Image (cartoon, rainbow, N blue to C red):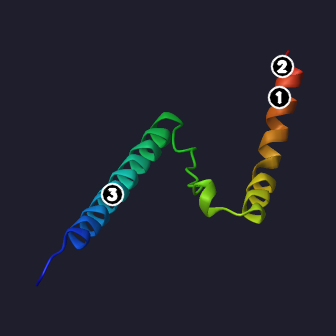
Amino acid sequence: MHYTLNSTFEQLIKDVAEAMNEVAEFVESEIYWYALQKFEGKAVLIHIPTIKYADNAFIQKIKRAFSPWLEQEKNFKKYAK
């Protein structure tokens, strides 16, 4: 097989990207495990993709999904004073 500088560089980029994904998965797992231990199993890890992969409709859905908790937090802070 004949390798060119471009094909070797492209393979290097793919290998680095794959390694970075593996590291990210490991870190996410560790964060989740730590949260489960710290909060006695009452933890949820939600992976939200980077903004470049999310359109406005996706962002609005995330806001709607979290709005009950955000309102609850606002009310708690308001009455805790």
Residue placed under numbered mark 2 in the picture: 80
Residue placed under numbered mark 3 in the picture: 22
Q: What residue type is labelled 3?
A: Glu
Pointer 2 and pointer 1: residues touching (CB < 8 Å)? yes
Which is nearer the N-term, disc 3 or disc 2?
3
Front-lying residue, 60 or 30: 60
Q: In this view, does 65 lie above or below 10?
A: above
Q: What residue type is labelled 2?
A: Ala
Marks 3 and 2, how far apart at CA: 43 Å
In the displayed structure image, the side of residue 5 where residue 27 appears, left or right? right
Residue 8 sits in quarter: bottom left
Mark 1 surroundings within 10 Å by alpha-carbon count, few (fewer than 14), some (14 through 19), many (20 or more): few
* Residue 62 picture location, percent across and down: 73, 56
Marks 2 and 1, how far apart at CA: 6 Å
Q: What residue type is labelled 1?
A: Phe
**Quadrant of the image containing the N terminus:** bottom left
Query: Which residue is depicted at the point 39% across and 45% down?
Result: 30
Which is nearer the N-term, disc 1 or disc 3?
3
Query: Which residue is depicted at the point 39% across and 55% down?
Result: 25
Residue placed under numbered mark 1 in the picture: 76
Local SS, label 2 = helix
Local SS, label 3 = helix
Front-lying residue, 17 or 44: 17
Pointer 3 and pointer 2: residues touching (CB < 8 Å)? no
Query: Which residue is depicted at the point 58% across and 54% down?
Result: 50
In the displayed structure image, the side of residue 59 where residue 39 appears, left or right? left
Local SS, label 1 = helix
Total labels drawn: 3
* Residue 40 picture location, percent across and down: 51, 39
